[in-house]
Image (cartoon, rainbow, N blue to C red):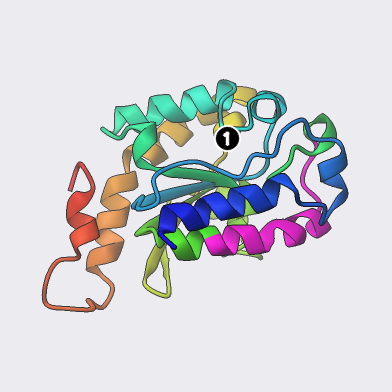
Amino acid sequence: MSTSDSLEKIAHEVATCTRCPLHSTRTNPVPGEGPSNAQIMFIGEGPGFHEDRQGRPFVGASGDFLTEMLNDIGLQREEVFIANVVKCRPPGNRDPEPAEIKACREYLDRQIALINPRAIVTLGRFSMARWFPDARISQIHGKAHTFDGRVVVPFFHPAAALHQPSLRQTVMDDFRKLLTLIQTAAENQPADSDDEPEDLQQLSLF
């Protein structure tokens, strides 16, 4: 089975998932979207109102802001994979609960394993907590770390900048450093071969 087919299989499983109560209040599941060979994967927290209506991640105001910042660094939305730690909208856009995140974790684990991105960008504290469980986002945002050869960069959620205008410049500055952060972190980790990784060469600004 191809990677694309495997990702589609996960999407079908999410569509019929009843692992947590969120399935009973959703309009549409939001499994995630993007190319199966994406080099950068963005992981947010959970679908909002517009995402729930359309079944796509980051299509509301925060999605527009994310797309704007991607374009600002020379990337198109279609080049990256975008997902969330929970695949269904929490009622009233409340924070996802630990049991809900746990119920969805297998889906996200499988997506990461299949896509095998060079870098993961966490958007917000709930996706950040997967790799940095005891950290405060205000202290580690915009700093690259490596986990098992993969770069993980925690960022504020784009919605935070929309709700707190004082954060907008910080969020934009972090984004503008993203490709440099990934490049630097990749150069500082042990190489698997004498050749530059092919996937690194494919990133548009590298």
Magenta residues span: 94-110
Q: Quadrant of residue 199?
A: bottom left
Where is residue 159 drawn, in percent x and y? Answer: 60, 30
**Is 110 located above or below residue 94 in the figure?**
below
Q: How many marks?
A: 1
Where is residue 76 drawn, in percent x and y? Answer: 33, 32
Badge 1 crowding class, 10 Å Cα cut-off, few under 14, some 14 to 19, many 20 or more, is many
Disc 1 secondary structure class: loop
In this view, the residue farthest toward the front is: 1
Q: Quadrant of residue 34?
A: top left
Left or right, 176 with respect to 15, comes to: left
Residue located beneath label 1 in the image: 57
Can residue 180 be seen in this snapshot?
yes
Can residue 143 be seen in this snapshot?
no
The magenta stretch spans residue 3: no
Point 33% across, 37% down: residue: 176
Amino acid type at circle 1 is Pro
Please name whichever residue, 45 or 18, is drawn nearer the observer in this view of the structure: 18
**Is 175 located above or below residue 86 in the figure?**
above
The magenta stretch spans residue 108: yes
Left or right, 171 with respect to 107, comes to: left
Where is residue 145 drawn, in percent x and y? Answer: 42, 64
In this view, the residue farthest toward the left is: 194
